[in-house]
């Protein structure tokens, strides 16, 4: 725990952000040191460190090697799926990254070009990301649980020259073959990709050579290219140049490409490692997420490495690989100081091992703090984890868009007393307010929209890829002068923030962010479906799960089980298995307002067992009454 005070640090960050962030910029090695922190000339779009230049992979690797730390551990790959482990020192990881940067360079990739990375949790994912950063190329990692249609949508939007992939990923019940999915995505997308670079894994059915030419691309083998690649040094880029695009679900079916810059990102992550996570060079951080999500970008890859800490890349699940002691084994074997995971993973462990008996077999004395994010850490799970581990369990709230925590308990400053259910206080740099629909601030304990005053601190989204207008329309127009988080919540009398849920159609299924609107579009595309509503309902394991209510077209002959199976299959093929869309109910009609808007919020409130509000504009109350028995909460869910 640090000695600097949270209150003074927070005050300094908001009273004089220019001085605060210029000082934080000292945590980074610059090619051109910035003289200014904020460029507000394009307000309400802001840029950080406008006159700075750097390379992010240099900061993650080279500088530690140059400081004499080349033989220290940078990356531990632990595969519970294969029962194997491999450690890379900073020098070894640097060598892999310069070589793969050489591979990409050989394929014509230069600064500003985009590369889509579709890889499972293997070291090549980290290497590919850092190799792009080294060239100043912009990576866009697509989560391996997404299907071809989702991959194609991202390819069309990011317009990459190359796709980097592997023969497949390992799931507990099956091997997931990636190459047919990539080929299908290339065929489905309008944008031509020049090269697909494939890292071969044993035990999979397909090779790059088999697909050569598919989708008009050259399909190449990673190892073969690496054997003759010329290692590449770091390319200096402007702090404001994009490092990556990460797609996330919004309210519509078309995902939003969050753009992260190089400079602000490096500064914010370096600052967060010391002040939020309290992780120093030489220590080990393990973030049990996936590189396909923002949490993986920030705290599996960039944060720990920029800070000179070791990071663990875990290919496995919290339970079943082989048991609910997997997390404790990894933490003990790799001397993990700080663990970061999603509440859903903790609930899965708790369900399988309620007394945390499996912790007994492992030496967890080095584990100092457990961080949770991805969804609200419910008080029950918080208590179970704190009691089972006997260490601080810190909920912190953030989003793909912000790239790092908006609210947290800053363990590297003076840690604050925790309140279960709250991610504590705003992180320095973030100004959090709760407002009503008209933008007026509400009193303590009144729930409202959570907004952040502009400018957001460094490291947060610069814009949406290819569309400043969409960025403005999606986030900046609802509440003038503020960024709308899409979350609702309240502040208590002591200023603790409580984040209670989304105000839009975004749901969180086992830590995977999905759009019910996107699922609805797919369900509605089935020929037998006249109209439908998909809502996210509470789930005791996954936090939320999507449920569909469909009205069939007149004359459509279908038994409920058949339509259920067909729609589940459609969503699985179009979005991916992680959507976990299994519950479909055929109904006579959907409740609507007189203007034809489906009352999704009321349906969700009923399904969650909450008090529900029926708008006075309801068209036919009997439709809702008929639906109530179907919507009523499943007693297994809470
Ligand atoms: N590639 C391909 N398929 C994947 C996948 C991937 N990367 N990740 C998940 N899937 C598949 C699973 O195999 C499963 O398929 P199935 O329907 O054929 O069984 C489906 O998607 C649902 O998987 P999952 O969401 O993992 O649910 P689960 O019921 O198998 O396991 C948990 C539940 C809670 C153990 C698991 O969801 C989990 O570990 N969650 C934590 C997620 C996380 O850390 N998110 C990051 C937030 S910061
Ligand atoms: P993602 O962009 O996938 O990280 O999802 C971001 C969303 O997840 C947020 O807008 C919240 O709705 C939810 N979320 C993430 N972390 C938390 C948290 N600690 N508490 C409450 N909600 C959270």
Image (cartoon, rainbow, N blue to C red):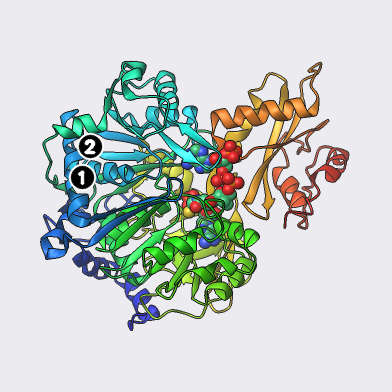
Residue situated in front as seen by the camera: 593 or 347:
347
In the image, taking residue 431 as reference, residue 598 lies left or right, namely right
Instruction: Assign the C terminus to one quadrant of the image.
Output: bottom right
For numbered disc 1, what is the local secondary structure? helix
* Residue 637 location, quadrant: bottom right
Q: Residue drawn at (70%, 28%), measured in percent from left and top?
A: 565
Tell me where residue 163 appears, x and y as whole percent: 32, 30
Residue situated in front as seen by the camera: 601 or 192:
192
In the image, taking residue 424 as reference, residue 638 lies left or right, namely right
- Which is nearer the N-term, disc 1 or disc 2? 1
Instruction: Assign the N terminus to one quadrant of the image.
Output: bottom left
**Count the marks: how many?**
2
**The CB of the residue at mark 1 lies under 8 Å from ligand 1:** no
Tell me where residue 443 appears, x and y as whole percent: 60, 71
Q: Residues within 10 Å of mark 2 (few under 14, many from 20)?
A: some
Q: Which residue is mark 2?
A: 112
Q: CA distance from mark 1 to mark 2?
A: 21 Å
* Residue 381 location, quadrant: bottom right
Residue 450 seen anywhere in this rendered image of the structure: no
Q: Which residue is mark 1?
A: 96
For numbered disc 2, what is the local secondary structure? loop
Residue 197 seen anywhere in this rendered image of the structure: yes
**The CB of the residue at mark 2 lies under 8 Å from ligand 2:** no
């Amino acid at each position: 725990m640090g000695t600097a005070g949270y209150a003074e640090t927070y005050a300094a960050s908001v009273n004089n952000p220019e001085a605060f962030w210029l000082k934080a910029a000292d945590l980074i090695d610059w090619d051109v040191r910035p003289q200014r922190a904020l460029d507000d000339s394009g307000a309400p779009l802001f840029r950080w460190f406008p006159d700075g230049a750097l390379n992010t992979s240099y900061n993650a690797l080279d500088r530690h090697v140059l400081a004499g730390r080349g033989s220290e551990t940078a990356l531990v790959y632990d595969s519970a799926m294969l029962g194997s482990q491999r450690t890379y020192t900073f020098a070894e990881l640097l060598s892999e990254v310069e070589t793969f940067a050489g591979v990409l360079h050989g394929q014509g990739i230069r600064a500003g070009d985009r590369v889509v990375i579709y890889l499972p949790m293997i070291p090549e994912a980290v290497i590919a990301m850092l190799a792009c950063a080294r060239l100043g190329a912009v990576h866009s990692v697509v989560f391996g649980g997404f299907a071809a249609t989702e991959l194609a949508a991202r390819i069309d939007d990011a317009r990459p020259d190359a796709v980097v992939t592997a023969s497949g990923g390992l799931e507990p019940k099956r091997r997931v073959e990636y190459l047919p999915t990539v080929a299908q995505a290339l065929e489905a997308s309008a944008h031509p990709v020049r090269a697909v670079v494939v890292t071969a894994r044993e035990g999979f059915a397909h090779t790059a050579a088999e697909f050569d030419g598919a989708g008009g691309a050259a399909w190449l083998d990673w190892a073969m290219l690496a054997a003759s690649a010329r290692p590449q040094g770091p390319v200096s880029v402007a702090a404001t140049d994009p490092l990556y695009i990460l797609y996330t679900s919004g309210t519509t079916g078309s995902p939003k490409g969050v753009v992260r810059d190089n400079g602000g990102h490096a500064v914010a992550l370096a600052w967060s490692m010391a002040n939020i996570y309290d992780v120093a060079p030489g220590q080990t951080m393990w973030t049990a997420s996936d590189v396909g999500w923002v949490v993986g970008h920030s705290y599996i890859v960039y944060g720990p490495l920029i800070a000179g800490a070791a990071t663990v890349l875990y290919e496995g699940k919290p339970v079943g690989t082989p048991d609910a002691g997997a997390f404790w084994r990894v933490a003990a074997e790799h001397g993990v100081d700080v663990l970061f995971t999603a509440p859903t993973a903790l609930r899965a462990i708790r369900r399988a091992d309620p007394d945390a008996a499996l912790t007994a077999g492992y030496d967890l004395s080095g584990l100092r703090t457990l961080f949770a994010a991805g969804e609200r850490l419910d008080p029950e799970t918080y208590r179970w984890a704190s009691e089972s581990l006997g260490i601080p369990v810190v909920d912190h709230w953030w989003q793909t868009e912000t790239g790092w925590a908006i609210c947290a308990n800053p363990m590297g400053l003076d840690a604050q007393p925790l309140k279960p259910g709250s991610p504590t206080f705003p992180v320095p740099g973030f100004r959090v307010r709760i407002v009503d629909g008209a933008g007026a601030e509400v009193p303590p304990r009144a729930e409202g929209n959570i907004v952040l005053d502009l400018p957001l601190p460094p490291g947060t989204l610069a814009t949406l890829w290819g569309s400043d207008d969409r960025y403005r329309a999606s986030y900046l127009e609802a509440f003038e002068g503020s960024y709308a988080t899409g979350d609702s919540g309240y502040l208590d009398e002591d200023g603790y923030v409580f984040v209670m849920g989304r105000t839009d159609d975004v749901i969180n299924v086992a830590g995977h962010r999905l759009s019910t609107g996107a699922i609805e579009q797919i369900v509605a595309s089935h020929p037998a479906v006249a109209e439908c509503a998909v809502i996210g309902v509470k789930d005791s394991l996954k936090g939320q799960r999507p449920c569909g209510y469909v009205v069939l077209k007149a004359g459509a002959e279908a038994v409920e089980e058949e339509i259920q199976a067909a729609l589940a299959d459609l969503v699985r093929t179009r979005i991916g298995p992680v959507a976990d869309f299994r519950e479909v109910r055929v109904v006579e009609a959907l409740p609507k307002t007189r203007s034809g808007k489906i009352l999704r919020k009321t349906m969700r409130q009923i399904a969650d067992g909450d008090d529900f509000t029926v708008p006075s504009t309801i068209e036919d109350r009997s439709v809702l009454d008929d639906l109530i028995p179907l919507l009523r909460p499943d007693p297994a869910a809470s």
